[in-house]
Image (tube, rainbow, N blue to C red):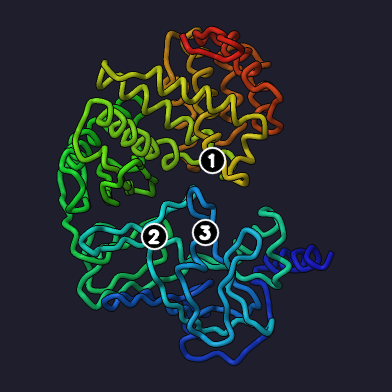
Amino acid sequence: MRNRIALTCLLAALSAGGAPAFAAAAPSALVRQAEETAPGARITVTRDGDRWTADYVLSQDAPVWAFYRSTVTNGTREPWRPRDWRVVTPGVVLERVGDLDVLRTMDGGPVPREVSLRLTPSGENLEADYPVLMFTDGSVAMPTGAFDVFPLPSLEAVQLSDDERGAYRRSVGNAWITWRDSAGPVLHHGRRQAQAEGDDGRTYVLFGQTEVKAAERLVTVVDPELPSWIAASIEGFAPRVADYYATRLGAGQTDRPTIMATWYGPTAGTTNYGGSVLPGLIVMTFEGKELLASSDAVLAENRWFIGHESAHFWLGQTVRAERARESWMTEGGADLMAVRAMKALDPGFDERSVLQAEVDDCARLAVRPVIEAGQRGEHRAWYSCGAVFALAAEAAQKKATGGDWFDFLKPLIDAGRADGVLTREAWLSRLPEVSGDPTLRTDIETLLTAGAADPAAVIARLFDRTGVAYRLVDGKIALG
């Protein structure tokens, strides 16, 4: 009850134009500057050789400061920040509490307004988040959003739901960060600068001298040891697939993206692709002995990967899901965009095997609610079930007009351009508009919000009514 009372008081303060009030402390000149110019924190991130520091100046007193992006590592699902970041300021600890990484004091009092940390960057892939990028020449790209923090009134408030914590998260803005490298300029928003600063939490800052190649339709920052065929594939294919999307969907978020690609070595027994997209920027990681030499199969997989990430400049950036739990629309939709683009640009592309994997994975994972997949660490459900729903929508569009997935998607993107949001309601409402069958959305909503004991049966019903070709083999769906 105490936590809900605290939240109610905060909401009242916010509605009156105020910010959450905690115990007062006499501010230093730096703290006064933070209060005046940044509603959350001012931070200076510095690299001096192998020594990395992040010096925080917090704008208000609070017993707990939590990190917005408190994700875990892929595979092990361990929190990375308490492992890689160490607090230097006496009496302050950085630890994992519930699903958040937090700064707190050992005595329970307000966190000092000035806190220093030592960083040991590592390039491990993260679950549904932006990792540090480590280049083989020693360059490092830091995700700016990793440093943002927000205040909480108590350690117990960490246990509030995401929705209940939302008011605290919204009570401060993005941190104002200064980026410095004693070795030379940093790369920020495509420009090398002796010192960069800003509050954009949706980009990367590059420390080091990895070469930047600027072409008419693409800027690349490629690890010098990345196999040359992968670099050539990126430079040659990315503009082609972006042009295809623009032809089918209109303008995307950018017409000249930057791609940062790193190489984690020819590790035997593994082939890993990682990637994510931010406004104007795609980040990609590659690892594995199989990638040393090009082959038709690996080239097709690499191009599909580029196609998926590029698709997010439309589905994810031009319009985004209203909440992370609705990422099935953007991730599954981008998967089908990439499949259809690949087939259009390379008629030999094996689309069936990719789509069959989507169906198989959705049938396996949708026994539990798809929208809760992120909390379970089953993000694959967003991709696979989102692609299955997109397949059904595409088939309905084909029945109605002879069109395809892009014809279903384009009106949704166009309708969302003004506010940049694609809602679940808009997506689900379009399906019966196209198909004339209101029960289609009911089956999709069942898998989204409740899951099903036999997801394959639900998927089969969707396919039957929309016209996706398949057959049942031992109770499993095999695409036709």
| Amino acid type at mark 2 | Pro
Sequence-earlier tag: 3 or 1: 3
The span from disc 3 to disc 2 (Cα, nearest Å) is: 11 Å
Question: Which mark's residue is nearer the viewer, 3 or 1?
Answer: 1
Question: Which mark's residue is nearer the viewer, 1 or 2?
Answer: 1
| Relative side of 325 to 237, left or right | right
- Residue beneath the point at 79% across and 63% down: 4
**SS of the residue under disc 1:** loop
Above or below 312: residue 212: below
Sequence-earlier tag: 1 or 2: 2
Q: Residues within 10 Å of mark 3 (few under 14, many from 20)?
A: some
In the picture, the disc for residue 69 is 3
The span from disc 1 to disc 2 (Cα, nearest Å) is: 21 Å
What x and y, as percent, mark residue 352? 40, 17
The span from disc 3 to disc 1 (Cα, nearest Å) is: 16 Å
Q: Residues within 10 Å of mark 1 (few under 14, many from 20)?
A: many
CB-based contact (under 8 Å), mark 3 and mark 2: yes
| Relative side of 161 to 359, left or right | right
Q: Nearer the viewer, residue 449 or 401?
A: 449
Residue assigned mark 1? 379
| Amino acid type at mark 1 | His
In the picture, the disc for residue 143 is 2
**SS of the residue under disc 2:** strand
Sequence-earlier tag: 3 or 2: 3
Above or below 342: residue 272: below
CB-based contact (under 8 Å), mark 1 and mark 2: no
